[in-house]
Amino acid sequence: MASLQLRAQRTALRSLRSPRTAGPRSSRLPSAAAVRSYATDLEPERPKAPRQGNETKLGRTFQGQVMGSIGARLRREREQREQYEQWRNITDPSRNWMMTFVFLSGVGIAYWLGTYWPREAEPTSTLPLSKTKEPRHNTKLENMQAAWADFVKIVGKDNVSTAENDIDHHATSNWSSHKANPDERSFCVVYPSTTEEVSKIMKVCHQRKIPVVGYSGGTSLEGHFTPTRKGVSVDFGRMNKIINLHKEDLDVVVQPAMGWEALNDHLGHEGLFFPPDPGPGAMIGGMIGTGCSGTNAYRYGTMREWVLSLTVVLADGTVIKTRQRPRKSSAGYDLTKLFIGSEGTLGLVTEATLKVTVKPESTSVAVCSFPSIRHAATCVSKVVGKGIPVAAVEILDDNQMKCINEAGMTSRAWAEEATLFFKFAGTPAGVKEQIAQVQGLAKQAGSQTFEFAKNQEEQDELWSARKEALWSTMAVKKPGDRVWTGDVAVPMSKLPDLIEETKEDMHKSGLFASIVGHVGDGNFHTILLYNDAQRAKAETVVHRMVKKAVEMEGTVTGEHGVGLVKRDYLPHELGETTVDAMRQLGTFADFPSTTDQKGFRPPVSAQLRQGGAGAEAQEGRGGRVVDISTGVGVRVEGELYQANDGVCVYDEGIDGIKEGAKKGICLCSWDFIEPDPNLEE
């Protein structure tokens, strides 16, 4: 049996060594399966007991070595072939290029999707500036031209303007302390006449990602209507009507370009009046946007107390009404108050329901002068501390009284000292009692003079100095001078200190500056004259005043609003988290993607300060003769002379002013004025 096994093994070895086929060595070898089959056939069944003898042991060891060597080599060669194929697939240049292309394409698409559809912000109660994204506006020429065509379809070609003078006029003004960047002006001005048209305009701007700035008159003082991202200016000048007067309910519904003076003229015939009285020419839309007040704020409160309901167009064109007409309501959030003071960052106001009140039975005015601004401020503190219900308390410093005398806009000369102006309202007996009380307190505070009006004519005369304060300063400014009017408000106990310190800072700066204020509620204004070379000094004076007001637990703006000038001061007054909360509130209407940085600008239209009516015209258009009785003209910013025959002459350095003309300031909005070529003759 053993010899048969040895013979079979030798035969198998000879067959393996003989070259029967051509080709690689590995191809001449038997397959692994054949070797396994051969080994199985040769190996006999193992007995249960171990075998004895050297032949069996040696034969088995030799067979195992041969078969194991062959199997191991075959497995190793198969693994090498598989590794080679894998390596060849991995290192193939075309495959590597394709994988790189696919990877980079995927990364690019993912980045694009992430920027175009950013993930929702983390659900926090505030929105820090660091987590906000710059609004994606599209002000490319082709997009703006397409939007212009859309606007024409909405309001008509005559109510869409790209004229250079219109663009300039809707960018800044002579009394705004923030200069406009020529590259940031609006592309066009659109003049809607209804809420529906405003809604359609906003839908176009929202879809095309065009920033919007609202505008009505442009006499705001803190850069409110100045564009910073090009876009579109929406002028509400055509929306200037009283929609409905509910006399029995003491409320009135008006459009945003209704001026408060014109409104009171209409209400006066009904024995009513609207108390908020900011600067001449202010309009309801801007008064709402800034949350303004005025000389009557001490007695009647600010704009916030006199607005019942608003119709507002949001960024995407959605129209909302904040509430109905009742005097009180507990239905949901008070959105009316939210929009007041928002300066257009939340929506554009197209209608307002306002409270009105009955005109007082009797009124009077008193004027008293003091040796210093501190004496005057101390008198105010005494009057307020006694709770005397005066209608208004105004302060003008010595420099302001000098301006009034020099400008000659009033019918009398005034003592050039710190002066207080009081308004009284109520029953005849009540007014008389108030005057006596104030006179006694003024004397205690060191007043040098005290006079009060006994009739309406004297009231108008005494109050005229306060009414002409800003315009008299503008009348005496030198060529090249600019006007910076700022305001702050502090608790009444801090008012004398802040006024005195601000007065000292203005004196040290070397700039001509004056103080005017609604001091009954701790609010006062500074009026600075400066040229371009002196701008840094003016900024320093304003900065110090604002800083001190905040340190005295006051506010950076009592009634002017934030605009572009005061926005950087907000975190100092309110704190970063409060501003972050405001920013988060602003996102509910998606306004950052549709509006400019301040949205709705205070729409206030100025008017001629001499002779009741007036005109405004573009600078550089030359002299004009204007009939003030017609009410037709364009915007004029400059000096105006009123002749005795009722004709106003606008002068830009032309010598041919008519003899006897009285100098004034032309600040009124009309439509068009034809140049007069015969003016110089």
Image (tube, grey):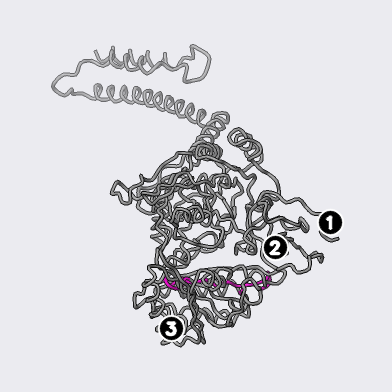
Tell me the CA gap for discs 3 and 2. Answer: 39 Å
Mark 1 burial class by Cα count in 10 Å: few <14, some 14-19, many 20+: few
What segment is highlighted magenta in the picture? 518-537
At numbered mark 1, what does the secondary structure look like: helix, strand or loop? loop
Location of mark 3 (residue) = 442
Query: Which is nearer the eye, 334 or 366?
Result: 366
Secondary structure under the numbered disc 2 in the rendered image? strand
Q: Nearer the viewer, mark 1 or mark 2?
A: 1
Amino acid residing under circle 1 = Asn
- The residue tagged 2 is 638
Q: Position of residue 289 (x, y in %)?
A: 48, 54
Q: Amino acid at mark 3?
A: Ala
Query: Given the current orientation, which residue lies at the most extreme left position?
Result: 49
Residue at 66% across / 76% down in the picture? 406
As measured in the structure, the alpha-carbon distance from the residue carrying label 1 to the one carrying label 2 is 20 Å
For the residue labelled by badge 3, is the local secondary structure a helix, a strand or a loop? helix
- Determine the residue positioned at 39% across, 48% down: 309
Is 526 a magenta residue?
yes
- Identify residue for label 1: 678
Split into 4 quadrants, where in the image is the C terminus? bottom right
Are circles 3 and 2 on residues that touch, CB within 8 Å?
A: no
Q: In percent of the image, x 40 and y 43: which residue is there? A: 321
